[in-house]
Image (spheres, coloured by chain):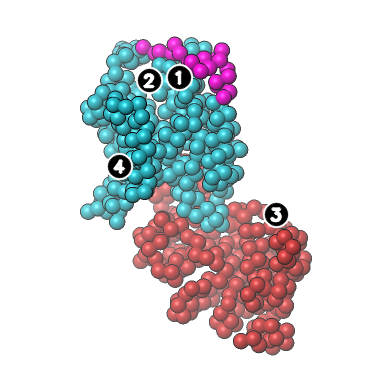
Amino acid sequence: MRQILHDWGLRYRTIFTGISLALLPFITPHDALATNILIFGLFAVGFNLLFGYLGLLSFGHAAFFGGGAYGAGLAIAHLDMGFLGAVCFGVLLATGLSIIIGIFAIRSKGIYFAMITLALAQLVYYVFFQMTSLTGGENGLRGITVKSIDLGYYSINLLNSKEKYYFLFIFVFLALALVSRILKSPFGGAIEAIRENENRAVACGYNVKVTKYIAFCISGGFCGLAGALYALHISIVPIDILHYQTSGMVVMMALLGGMGSFFGPFIGAAIFLLIEDVVGVWTSYWQLVAGVVFILFVLYFPKGIWGSLVDWARR
Amino acid sequence: MTKNVILRVEGLTKKFGKFVALENVNVSFPEGQLTAIIGPNGAGKSTFFNLISGEISPSRGKIYYYDRDITDVPQYKFSKLGIAKSFQITNIFPELSTLENVRIAIQAMHSKYQLWKNRNELSSLRDEAYDLLGVVGLQDRAKRRADTLAHGEQRSLEIAIALACNPRLLLLDEPTAGMSPEETVDLMDLATKLAVDRTILIVEHKMKLIMGISHHLVVFHQGKLLAEGSPDEVRNNDDVKRVYLGSR
């Protein structure tokens, strides 16, 4: 029974995740929270591709999320692009950043990899911080509101929170389908093999560095998509988005939900954002609660919420 | 009868800091034979094994595979050349299924960076992997997670992984380490069977067993080549008797 549950979960994970996300606005107290879970969930999925499936802990993924957000923002503010163009531009900028950062980071392992990604991401932060005329510096990039999208016969009103949610949902769902496809591909098998045993993978004939590098860039691209959607969601790009706190947050989300599982990152994002949303009303020290929850999980459920459930199912 | 040489090393030397682990070794391995590398602890067997399998690079000297210089070839290219190895310490993909362990190794020969196809639909790879599990007698374990296998089974799985690239030269580093006597005998039988159509190089401690199955022996002592030849020649070699066999 459990085995069947597990196999089905694996086979229909994209559809299952899609249905859950489609129902999300009816569960959350307000639509903005649902939209945040949607976007940060995708961010965590992109991050988890590297962390959970390949086993590389990056502390610099703020650069790709922020890069995607700034890419989308800059495309609207300076290049007069529309919604789609802005999303594409955001993904391109984030992927470009990951291509450059990856060259330097991928040759190192473990703590060194984490530190190099952290340092290079902070470098990106300061570059965007200093380029005030282009990025707005510490005030963030403003004036990038997209009110509606004209599809010819129908115009999507992005000021309506439900319409906006389901419009962004289409992008997230397509991205998830793509991630799932990649994970099921021979390449997906190769990255899992490298996580499991790098030496053996080399002996089998896998070029570990190239494989890691490709995975790093793919991860950066998906995080960039999440960032671009986030910029269009909140109509501003705050400079904090590039800060290392964003990198730390996505690590927490992935761990809370369960790294190495497909749906886990969404659970992690939901828990984290729920704590912020609920506890944040009472006290500005909500991160204290998030921190305690995080520590408890690392100590008692190291596989995260979803990861523990998946483990139970396949036992 | 002259035989082709599959692997040849010239002046192979490896230093770790000031310690000379292997000094000026010249030796060649005939194709199609089962050659055993023996020697007491610290003789340089493992260093030699790691050098010829590309794990570490030599301080000096050259390694030739069919007259091709492979000294500086990166390790991940060895499997494409037809050189495969099993490790001294069990080295599998623990959380993957037994079948996937072998399938992933076969896949490395075909489509490494393929992002789109579903890997489970590449049925020829699955069938090939299943056949290889048959060679080492693990077909009924195909669906089990690799880390749930018994130790001896894991060692066999490792050989199946090594066979995935259909190697012409198979390097085995103490394949029977930690095995029960029955498992050891099974594995030696397997090695003999595999040696029929490929060259095998095996590092082994269990002298009696290895003498029985190998065609050719290479003896190391204190980082140097001490002797080589047929089991009988080596058994009657005075140097070998003194440092190795005599001490037992």
Task: Nearest to the eye among marks 3 and 1: give it.
Answer: 1
Q: Where is mark 3, residue-wise?
A: B72
What colour is chain B? red
Q: Estimate the spatial distance between the alpha carbons at disc 3 and disc 4, rounded to whole Å.
A: 46 Å
Disc 2 marks which amino acid? His
Instruction: Name the element at disc 2.
Output: helix
Q: Which disc number belongs to residue A233? A: 2
Establish whether labels 3 and 2 are both on one chain. no
Residue range highlighted in magenta: A126-147
Disc 3 marks which amino acid? Asp
Closer to the camera in the image, B62 or A269: A269
Relative to B223, is A202 above or below? above
The chain containing the residue under callout 2 comes to A
What colour is chain A? cyan
Task: Nearest to the eye among marks 4 and 2: give it.
Answer: 2
Q: Which disc number belongs to residue A237? A: 1
- Is residue A26 something one can see in this rendering? yes
